[in-house]
Image (tube, helix red, strand yellow):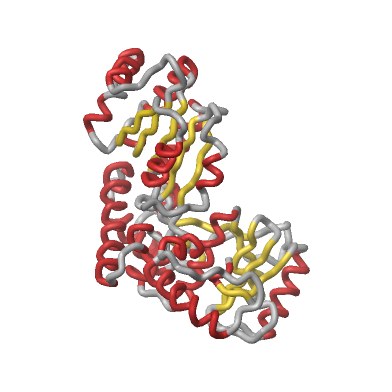
Amino acid sequence: MIYPRTIYSDIEKHLDTPEAVILTGMRRTGKTTLLTLIRDRLRTDNKLFLDLENPLNRKYFEEEDYEKIKAALEFLGLSFKKKPHILLDEIQHVRTLPSVVKYFIDHYKVKFFLTGSASYYLKNLFTESLAGRKAIFEVFPLTFREFLAFKQSPFKIPETAVTKPVFASIDRLYEEYMRYGGFPEIVLKEDTNEKAKALEDVFTSFFQLEVLQLGDFRRNDVIRDLMLLLMQSTGSKIDIQRISRDMTVSRPAIYDYLAFLEGTYFIKTVRPFSKGRSTEVRKTPKVYVCDTGLANHFARLDEGHIFENSIFQNLRVKGELNYYQKKSGVEIDFILNKKDAYEAKINPRESDIRRMKDVSHELGLKSCRMVSRKFSELEGVIYGFML
């Protein structure tokens, strides 16, 4: 069974457009499943699906003469006498693929659907060669609303006031979401031991297939230790100088590692919101992990940090995120698309809400919402499952 993903409605608008559709994101987030869904919903029989993790399939695209590639594709059953559709999974395994895709789009009007797990490489490879010929979609771990769909839950997320019984019913599922995260295969497992083993497998496969095979770093032990450190630091500012000192690695190297881990979707750095005000602290980004399940399993964070990371996980799919903090310590955890403020608290107080409203008004933001982990009687409070 293929479960619905929110992003598919956006992808669907591009099924018949001339651009190549590229799905990228962290490993095991469901890109192959989405590609399969696209294949099944294409209204044509003239389509070919190939998994490029298979070395035999890679050979078709490694010919220097692209017309020989065309002949191979025709041998596999694709016709170039009518609109061809080619779906390729895990394209990062063929470095020359951007050039091949450009050639077939330009010469044969081929419609491509491509997936790749490493944005770090995909964006560099495709930026120039497919300028104006691609639509990129980022696939992330499940939001909580998608999580409910995968669990086949009958609950509908309330849009307004939440009663205590309703909160208690949904919170049981939100607790599971916070603990084990949103990787589809893990959500679908029922046994907690299997979920834990699957989380370890996600980490291992990322390290082996992204870091070792694609990263080409001299010190793989250092980037492994940095990954563990970053999971322990989720929701905190990145102190490059301290990390460099503690790990005895140069600051430029740390910056390179961070760029790689962000480019391959393992982490996300959130920059400060700025309107040029002198009261802001220095421009240090915060770091969040791609999935609460990974952060919780490997770092054993307290509930506050896991909750904040889950809020990040549900907001990042909606646009650009920033945070705001004054030297006085007053802060807003997330500002979405430069206009909507979200503050995460385990048990918010009335004073927290007043303070957030004051800062939001000062910044000229459109709205502000206090997101509570526990049930609250305070007016205007929302919950993580409502995002």
Q: Position of residue 1 (x, y in %)?
A: 36, 53
Give the x, y percent position of residue 4.
Answer: 46, 53
What residue appears at the point 69 percent right and 82 percent down from the top-left corner? 379
Residue at the image position 73 percent from the left and 68 percent from the top? 360
Residue 99's place in the image compared with 333, above or below, is above
Q: Residue 345 appears at what percent x and percent y? A: 57, 78
- Choose between 344 and 155: the one closer to the eye: 155
Left or right: 272 in relation to 379: left
- Give me the residue at 50% from left, 27% from top: 130
238 and 308: which one is in front?
Answer: 308
Residue 253, visible in the rendered structure: no
Q: Residue visible at 49% across and 76% down?
A: 170
Q: Is 326 drawn above or below residue 150 in the view shown?
A: below
Residue 143 visible (yes or no):
yes
Identify the residue at the far left of this view.
56
Horizontally, residue 227 falls left or right of residue 212, namely right
Which image quadrant is residue 275 in? bottom right
Where residue 107 sits: x, y (%)?
47, 15
The image shows residue 94, relative to residue 226, as above or below, that is: above
| Image quadrant occupied by the C terminus | bottom right
Q: How many labels does the image show?
A: 0
Q: Which of 293 and 246 is in front in this view?
A: 293
